Image (cartoon, grey):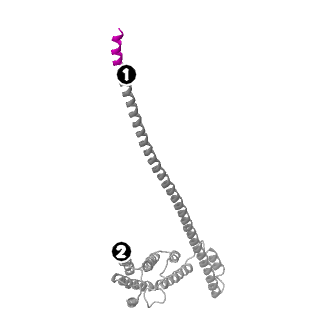
Amino acid sequence: MAPAEGVSRCPMAASRLELNLVRLLCRCEAMAAERRDPDEWRLEKYVGALEDMLQALKAQASKPASEVLGEYSRKVDFLRGLLQAEKLTSPSEKALANQFLTPGRVPTTARERVPATRTVHLQSRARYTDEMRSELLGTVRPGDLAEVDVRRRSGAAGPRAADEKQSAAELDLVLQRQQALQEKLAEEMLGLARSLKSNTLAAQSVIKKDNQTLSHSLKMADQSLEKLKTESERLEQHAQKSVNWLLWAMLIVVCFIFISMILFIRIMPKLK
């Protein structure tokens, strides 16, 4: 527990939960830097506890600043990725997975000059490179080392020192090829990520324009509906006025006819 002694001087620690998280993080970084047995299980449990504590810290009302939480998340994700890389079987796969890990940027304690996760990252990279070198020296792959095998068989009668030097040079060549292949793969993945980002932005722009067009259409439809309602009310009022005038005109005509009939009836007997 020695790495946790400088936690009290860490500028990032504030609450009790954050202090416990920093102490456990220091312990996990120290364990990751050590050579561990394949059956070692404590580090994985500690990292799981770190993830739970980090989620609880994010849910607190008095949580740290977003930059501090981002640094904690970066270190916990690095430890989780390191454990997953160690579970891979091939040293080349481990080295490739190690390249995509992102160590912390800020030291966890005030006693650290360089972030411990960055040191662990460099150590694991060197270890996986040594494992790849040992695997290439111990086994011959038909794709990458066919030329190496032919040269070894043809020069078996030569001096041992020259053969070892030649094998080392050929091994470096194979490692360079694998490194170039890994870099090419990383560039392709980066290109795919950029293409996906550009497509997403283009789709977002199209959707935004469609939403604007739809909003404008809905607005015009509402205006048309209001105008239609106003005109319907005016037409209804006009129809009511027309009906009233027609009714009065009919009443006047009926009265005129009635009076005319009465006068006609009274005038006709006198004429007889």
Magenta-tinted stretch: 261-272
Q: How many marks?
A: 2
Residue 217 placement (x, y as % from top left)? 49, 52
Up the image or down, 179 lies above or below 193; here it is below
In the rendered structure, which amino acid carries the disc numbered 2?
Ala
- Label 2, secondary structure: give it: helix
The N terminus: image quadrant? bottom left
Magenta span: chief secondary structure: helix
Characterize the local packing of mark 2: few (<14), some (14-19) or many (20 or more) Cα atoms within 10 angstroms.
few
Q: Which residue is mark 2?
A: 59
Instruction: From the viewer's side, name the closer residue of 178 and 106.
Output: 106
Q: Is residue 154 left or right of residue 115?
A: right
- Residue 39 in sight here: no
Mark 1–mark 2 distance (CA, rounded to whole Å): 93 Å
Residue 205 placement (x, y as % from top left)? 53, 61
Instruction: From the viewer's side, name the closer residue of 110 and 163.
Output: 110
Mark 1 vs mark 2: which is more N-terminal?
2
- Residue 14 in sight here: yes
Would residue 263 be counted in the magenta stretch? Answer: yes
Residue drawn at (58%, 71%), measured in percent from left and top?
Answer: 187
In the rendered structure, which amino acid carries the disc numbered 1?
Ile
Residue 114 placement (x, y as % from top left)? 49, 87
Q: Which residue is mark 1?
A: 257
Residue 257, quarter of picture: top left
Identify the residue at the far front of this view: 270
Would residue 9 be counted in the magenta stretch? Answer: no
Residue drawn at (35%, 25%), measured in percent from left and top?
Answer: 255
Up the image or down, 272 lies above or below 126; here it is above
Instruction: From the viewer's side, name the closer residue of 217 and 73.
Output: 217
Instruction: From the viewer's side, name the closer residue of 214 and 169.
Output: 214
